[in-house]
């Protein structure tokens, strides 16, 4: 009997507060990816610590509303992390960041064992879960680990997570010889698939055998927040279903196009 496909997202959560609009939403890379996965009908768990303030109450309620598995969501005393933003046209401007309870986030042994029971575990550069990912991989070498390195293409974390990350996501601006060489090197070092999102130029992926690419879907841009996380959610959900890399790039592009048409990081 085939085991059901299950994804877990592990990492941070916060509120993005737009000072010039007096609007906010609950977010975080792990949160955005988990919600966008769940909205595709694939079971997804979120592993994080949520503050006990009003923002935290809203965060927790949103997890429930979005049908996330909250088995390993801890409620901890303190304030929710806040990123103060401004939106000028479609451009986001990041301001001050208050770390709140994220300053002391801990992933314990039960979190690790729970994550290791999933088909795929995702985290991101800001998720503060690198050591946890190593422990998850050690607990179950068969679990797929995906990770968003964002635009940190020369960061030491590439070495730190070598042999841990199976599907790496990177942000770049165009398909050229440099990014093809970069993706090739990542797979040579142990990744199964290396993916680069290229903004308006679509995306490209390499699996050790060939390159795959896909363009974009036209969209009315309201806010580019969540574009990367929603693309990743689309990619990993489709990849687990079909193992078709081109279809995974296409699904990621389609979901990202929908998400950037709304103010928040998911539909």
Image (cartoon, rainbow, N blue to C red):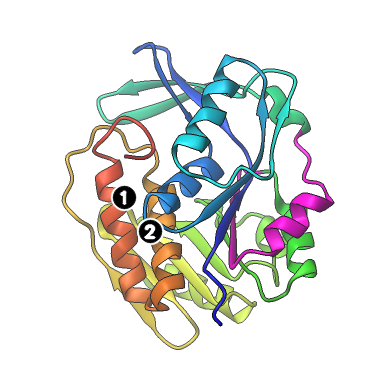
Q: Quadrant of the C terminus?
A: top left
Query: Left or right: 91 with respect to 66?
Result: left
- Residue furthest to the right in view is 109
Q: Nearer the viewer, residue 64 or 184?
A: 64
Q: Quadrant of the N terminus?
A: bottom right
Q: Position of residue 140 (x, y in %)?
A: 74, 71
Residue that appears at 47% across and 44% down = 67
Q: Quadrant of residue 147?
A: bottom right
Q: Position of residue 48 (x, y in %)?
A: 66, 40
Q: Which residue is mark 2?
A: 234
Residue 124 in the magenta stretch? The answer is yes
Residue that appears at 36% across and 69% down = 248
Q: Position of residue 63 (x, y in %)?
A: 52, 37
- Label 2 with label 1: CB-CB less than 8 Å: yes
Residue that appears at 31% across and 30% down = 263
Mark 1: few/some/many CA within 10 Å (<14, 14-19, 20+): many
Q: Earlier in the sequence, mark 2 or mark 1?
A: 2
Q: Secondary structure at mark 2?
A: helix
Residue 199 in the magenta stretch? The answer is no
Residue that appears at 39% across and 77% down = 242
User: Is 127 located above or below residue 88 in the figure?
Assistant: below
- Residues shaded magenta: 105-127
Q: Position of residue 70 (x, y in %)?
A: 61, 42
Q: Nearer the viewer, residue 137 or 53?
A: 53
Q: Is residue 212 visible?
A: yes
Q: Which residue is mark 1?
A: 256
Query: Left or right: 125 with respect to 267?
Result: right
User: Is 111 located above or below residue 222 in the figure?
Assistant: below
């Amino acid at each position: 009997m085939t085991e059901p496909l299950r994804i877990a997202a592990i990492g941070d959560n916060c509120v993005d507060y737009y000072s010039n609009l007096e609007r906010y939403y609950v977010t975080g890379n792990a949160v955005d990816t988990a919600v966008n996965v769940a909205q595709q009908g694939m079971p997804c768990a979120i592993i994080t610590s949520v503050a006990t303030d009003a923002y935290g109450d809203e965060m927790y309620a949103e997890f429930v509303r979005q049908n996330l598995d909250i088995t390993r969501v801890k409620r901890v005393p303190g304030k929710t992390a806040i990123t103060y933003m401004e939106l000028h046209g479609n451009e986001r401007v990041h301001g001050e960041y208050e770390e709140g309870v994220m300053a002391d986030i801990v992933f314990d042994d039960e979190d690790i064992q729970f994550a290791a029971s999933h088909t795929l575990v995702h985290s991101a550069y800001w998720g503060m879960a690198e050591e946890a990912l190593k422990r998850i991989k050690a607990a179950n070498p068969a679990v797929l680990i995906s990770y968003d390195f964002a635009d940190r293409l020369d960061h030491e974390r590439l070495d730190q997570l070598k042999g841990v990350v199976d599907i790496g996501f990177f942000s770049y601006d165009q398909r050229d010889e440099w990014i093809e060489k970069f993706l090739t090197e990542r797979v040579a070092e142990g990744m199964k698939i290396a993916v680069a999102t290229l903004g308006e130029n679509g995306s490209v992926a390499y699996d050790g055998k060939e390159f795959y690419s896909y363009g974009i879907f036209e969209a009315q841009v309201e806010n580019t927040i969540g574009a990367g996380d929603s693309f990743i959610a689309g990619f990993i959900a489709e990849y687990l279903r079909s193992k078709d890399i081109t279809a995974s790039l296409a699904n990621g592009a389609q979901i990202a196009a929908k998400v950037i048409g709304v103010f928040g990081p998911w539909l």
